[in-house]
Amino acid sequence: MLEDAIGSVVAVDLKDGEVLEGELSGYDQHLNLVLSADEDTTIIRGDNVVSIHL
């Protein structure tokens, strides 16, 4: 399912209650995510992810 979301904008809910939005650039088997927003790139560790909204 995440493979289909590559290049799409997603919202990621984190354990600390923060919500990050950006274009999903990549992920791995541990649910580590790479988000791109504007000219910034954010790497999110999979153990911090609560949910991903496509």
Image (cartoon, grey):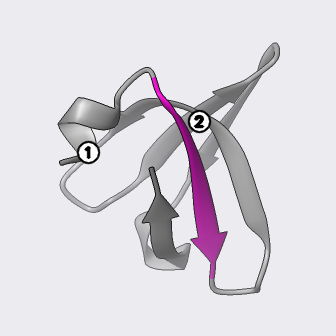
Between label 2 and label 1, give the one nearer the viewer. 1
Quick one: SS at disc 1?
helix
41 vs 1: above or below: above
Q: Which residue is mark 2?
A: 35
Q: Which mark is residue 52?
A: none
**Left or right of 5: which side holds 12?**
right
The residue located at (79%, 73%) in the rendering is: 18
Judge whether residue 12 is colored magenta: yes
Disc with the residue nearer the chain's start (2 vs 1): 1
- Is residue 7 rendered magenta in the image? no
Task: Label 2, secondary structure: give it.
Answer: strand
Q: Determine which residue is flagged by label 1.
A: 2
The answer for how far apart the CA atoms under marks 2 and 1 are is 13 Å
The three-letter amino acid code for the residue at tag 1 is Leu
- Bounds of the magenta segment: 8-14
Q: Position of residue 7 (x, y in %)?
A: 43, 20
The residue under the point 33% across, 35% down is 5
